[in-house]
Amino acid sequence: MLAVASPTPSVAFHYRARRIVPMSSETENAIKNEAPRFKVVILHNVMSNWTAGDTEVSDTAIKRMRRGLVELGYDVESAVVRQDIAAPIQPFDPREYVVFNWCEGVDGAPMAYDRIPPVLESLGFAYTGADASALNITTDKALTKEHLIKNNVSTPISKTYTSAECGDWENFPAMVKPAAEHCSNGITSEAIVDNVEQLEERVQYVLDTWHQPALVEDFIDGPEFNVSLWGNGRLSVLPLAMIDFGGFSDYHERIVSYDAKWDPNTEAFRMSPVICPAPIDAELKARIEKTAKDAYRVMRLRDYGRIDIRVRDGIPYVLDVNSNPDITLEGGFSRSARTAGYDYAQTISRILQFASKRMPKP
């Protein structure tokens, strides 16, 4: 997903690459030299409430993606979605083009991710990423939790509240977050609460400020991992990234807050570096990867995705499932792909190749 659609600053996690794991020369040569079998349309948003800075960030990202794909030999067009989804894409032939779906909704409904796929499907296009059902579920943290629990995927105990009457909650410390936000919106150190009084105060804050239910969950005070995966059926896990909270003695600060994710001028950002690949043993790595694959499949992700996981007492817990995650050059998915030896254009090309398998036959 394009980072500006929330809108949020265009700064991704800073990271330390410990060791580059190159892909095989055969794979690299195939991606670089194989003549593309299809053309590409980059479908993206322009929102009326964007600032000039937001628009500049978006334009830069689109140009970067397009330039990289052209260098790989693709014929690339771009199409802008404001409110009408079908009109911008109708000039293109679905037997020739794959759509890179870089939309987060439509103007006036920037969180309506699930509106885009049905239109593309009705016009016969293969497109990158998740379908409408998966997008709808994964943008709702409570629904995501329900699906994970139903399918025996480890995730923190949680409950959704529509009022600040939380006397039945007994697990502390707990984290309180808006149930339908992303990009760490609403996440600060005050989101970690230690008793019922703090819990009810924070739930009321979410209800009043974000105008949506509050998701309360058991706070897993342990290392956090971004697990980027791609594929369909047979999945490949890219190098794990670990957020280093070692500089914080207070567990209330050991979180991926909004500041830690987006604002380089804050202590939270500077003290939360990302190490990729993660410095963990093979056994823990295998457990994390299995949990991430289970979550990817249960939530019916497609082509690419990112699963955010924390570990406590050796047990991985799924915090969030990101369908169509941030795929900008600075984003976490690109970081892991880069650590695996894929440059940005190769990363985008591979995602498009996955989607191209769904193209209608000529």
Image (cartoon, rainbow, N blue to C red):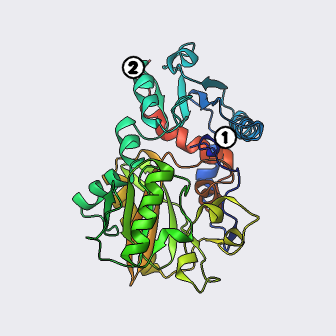
Residue 122, which numbered label? 2
Coordinates of residue 88 in the picture (x, y in percent)? 58, 18
Mark 1 — residue? Answer: 33
Q: Quadrant of residue 214?
A: bottom left
Mark 2 belongs to which amino acid? Ser
- Is residue 224 depicted above or below 331 in this figure? below
Q: Nearer the viewer, residue 361 or 161?
A: 161
- Is residue 203 depicted above or below 299 in this figure? below
Residues at marks 2 and 1, CA–CA distance in whole angstroms: 33 Å
Coordinates of residue 223 in the picture (x, y in percent)? 51, 77
Q: Do labels 2 and 1 touch, CB within 8 Å?
A: no
Coordinates of residue 166 in the picture (x, y in percent)? 31, 66
Residue at 39% x, 54% y is: 141
Coordinates of residue 165 in the picture (x, y in percent)? 31, 63
Q: Nearer the viewer, residue 303 or 222?
A: 222
Q: Is residue 339 left or right of residue 138?
A: right
